[in-house]
Image (cartoon, coloured by chain):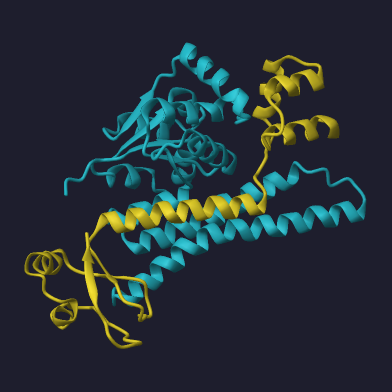
Amino acid sequence: MIYVGKNIVIDACVAIDLSIPQVNFIEGFLKCLGDDKVYISSVNFEEVRDGKVKRILHESNNVNVFLADEVKFNMFSNEIEPLRINLATKDRHVLFLANELKADYVVSSDLNVIDKTDKYRKHMRFNYMKTLTTISLLEYLYLERKIEYDTLFEKGLYLFKNKEIDNILNHLSDENLNSSRQKQIEIINEYKIIFKDRFEMYREPIVNQFRHLWSVGGI
Amino acid sequence: MDSDERSILVSLCEGKITFSEAAKILEVSKKRVEEMLESFNWIPSSARIAELRETEREVLSHIEKESEPIIRRSSSFMYSYKSMKFDKSVANKMINSGTSVTSLLSKQENVSLTYMGNGSRYKLCN
């Protein structure tokens, strides 16, 4: 069987998440890709504020910064509007690029982007453009034997601790907490569910792969 | 952002209305709605997140099956885990010779097998 490298479109948040000091895996990620190629829209590339990370992305042979064609982008936006797949402009560039390239995978830690990409893919009945979150990207690398289990475990937990918890609490801060006690309790209860959902996204790959490793005597 | 605007943006993210409809309700331009959405955080419902996770698990499961030779059970008995992985050399030997898994298990280092039933039959999947 001949292995063909995959085309992976990433959202800006993936590069940002993997490059925070506690995770520090952006270079490791790009080096272990093998035949896989990473694509990022120039619009999303500009969302990466850290000059060092931009340089790493720019200098990697495995990364292509794709200059967005505004005319095509506007046409695509008009095409998806009746489908009610509504994304903010920057997020829509992720979906646009994935569609342009017929990408194998689309990676984002933004569940809104994941949600809309999945809806679009299912509507179009594509067998490509499959969605992965950042933690699932790590699991993908592990399954492809590009990283060891300890990397999946360590980077995954650090991502949860240093990115996911902050994201959830930032989201909570957008809520109107200056409301009745009853309303506050409703919001808190909703966030308890959100927290557990997010935790599950990290627990599942780490535990599943650990169980598998254990079963084959790899640990 | 007031609660009415927020409610319209939630409807937009949930796919209940289009950008044009949101612009009409809010009495602003479509471009303005896009700008408002840029700074608005929305996450799918818990049920939808569970559905997305399930889709991801299917994708990863497919990757796992594609990425290496895996021995899977083909009868109704159960092992305590869903699959076993073999070294490439062992797997190739099995493919080429049609050798049964059980006869090779003893030659495979670091493989432990927990048997939970009778009548085992295996097949090699690549």
Residue A104 location (% of width, % of height)? 36, 39
Image location (x, y in percent) of residue A141: 34, 52
Residue for point 49% across, 41% down: A108
Asked if residue A102 is positioned above or below residue A168 in the image, the reply reads above
Residue at (11, 64) in percent of width and height: B92
Q: Which chain is cyan?
A: A
Quadrant assignment for the C terminus of chain A = bottom left
In the foreground, A166 or A107: A107
**Residue at the limit of the structure toward the top, as seen here:** A71
The residue at 15%/63% (across/down) is B88
Q: Does B80 sit left or right of B28 as displayed? A: left
Residue B40 placement: quadrant:
top right
A164 sits to left or right of B84: right
Residue B116 vertical placement versus B20 (above, below): below
Q: Position of residue A70 (x, y in %)?
A: 49, 13
According to the colouring, which chain is yellow?
Answer: B
- Regarding residue B2, the answer to whether it shows in the image is no
Q: Quadrant of residue A82?
A: top right
Residue at x 39%, y 54% (from the top left corner): B60
Going by the picture, which residue comes out furthest to the left?
A: B97
Residue lying farthest to the right in this orientation: A180
Give the side of residue A200 with respect to residue B67, left or right: right
Of A114 and A14, nearer the camera is A114
Q: Nearer the viewer, residue B65 or A191?
A: B65
Q: Position of residue A35 (x, y in %)?
A: 23, 41
Q: Could one spot residue B97 in this view of the protein?
A: yes
In the rendered structure, the answer to whether residue A199 lies left or right of residue A147 reads right
The answer to which image quadrant residue A194 occupies is bottom right
Instruction: State whether residue A107 is above or below residue A51.
Output: below
